[in-house]
Amino acid sequence: MIDQRLPIVTIDGVALHAIDEATCVRHVLDELAAGRGGWIVTPNLDHLCRASRDQDFRRMLGKADLALADGMPLLWATKVQGTPLPQRVAGSTLVWTLAEAAAGQGRSLFLLGGAPGSAQAAARVLHQRFPDLKIAGTHCPPMGFENDQAQMRAITEALVAAKPDLVYVGLGSPKQERLIEQLRLQNLLPAAWFLGVGISISFIAGHVKRAPKLLQVIGLEWFHRLCQEPRRLARRYLLDDFPYLFRVLWLAGRHRLAGKDCGNETGKDGRKRDTRDCH
């Protein structure tokens, strides 16, 4: 369940934490030190678009402990509605900062998913960059693993044997969210933190190139990905996400003009949290 102790802003019914990357990393390390595990999601515009038509996916996003905006369009929308998020927290950046912080505390990391060979290559890169990071293991399940009890059992057995502090799950969305939810429900690793990382395992390994910094900053990282995989991503980005962007911005503008502002509410811990919404 999304952590109510941290400030929250909602876009089209999806709650996002209004925190920066450094705060996210500190929170995860503090929770690890306290023996509490969790789940991080980094929704982008495509995730919100899917959540708008898939109630089960929306439910899964709401079950994560931390939800961080990965995508400049989400920052634009929150700025338009008058509840600006402090920073984009991209999963493809968080994989590095979280690994570095974990290494500083001698924590361990398990890489699950990615293209064949990517998890092992990413593990080598991370260990070279952060020698104190313990690589607990890697596992790349085959296509269709989610419908194969033996393959699902192999995943759980590998994780239980490794006992990692962090688990990066790179299986694409919504497959990775479904798997993380199942693993969390089994309570096999109650003190571990899970992060769905999509293609970021291949980014770390160097098998796929991330967009140049300029495209990331101006919100055109999606265009770089579209150029890399046009046949797979054209429909998603151009026919689904692009029209949805206008809907989100329209909702944000309507919210701002209406002057709707629920303000701050006090959570169970006595701390203030932002509950401003855009519906």
Image (cartoon, helix red, strand yellow):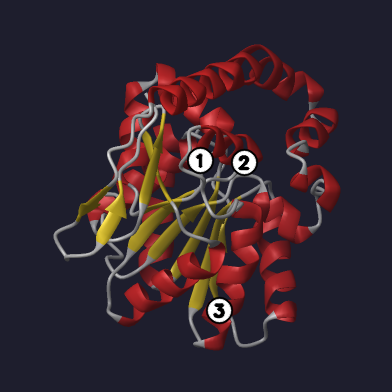
Q: CA distance from mark 3 to mark 2?
A: 23 Å
Q: Is residue 162 above or below residue 60?
A: below
Q: Secondary structure at mark 1?
A: loop
Q: Which residue is mark 3?
A: 101
Give the x, y percent position of residue 252: 48, 26
Name the amino acid type tagged 3.
Ala
Q: CA distance from mark 2 to mark 1?
A: 8 Å
Q: Which residue is mark 2?
A: 71
Give the x, y percent position of residue 227: 85, 29
Name the amino acid type tagged 2.
Gly
Q: Secondary structure at mark 2?
A: loop
Q: CA distance from mark 3 to mark 1?
A: 22 Å
Give the x, y percent position of residue 230: 80, 23
- Rendered residue at 36%/49% (across/down): 8
Q: Residues within 10 Å of mark 3 (few under 14, many from 20)?
A: some
- Lower sequence index among marks 3 and 1: 1
Give the x, y percent position of residue 68: 48, 50
Q: Nearer the viewer, mark 2 or mark 1?
A: 2
Q: Which residue is mark 1?
A: 43
Q: Is residue 184 left or right of residue 151?
A: left
Name the amino acid type tagged 1.
Pro
Q: Are marks 2 and 1 in contact (CB under 8 Å)?
A: yes
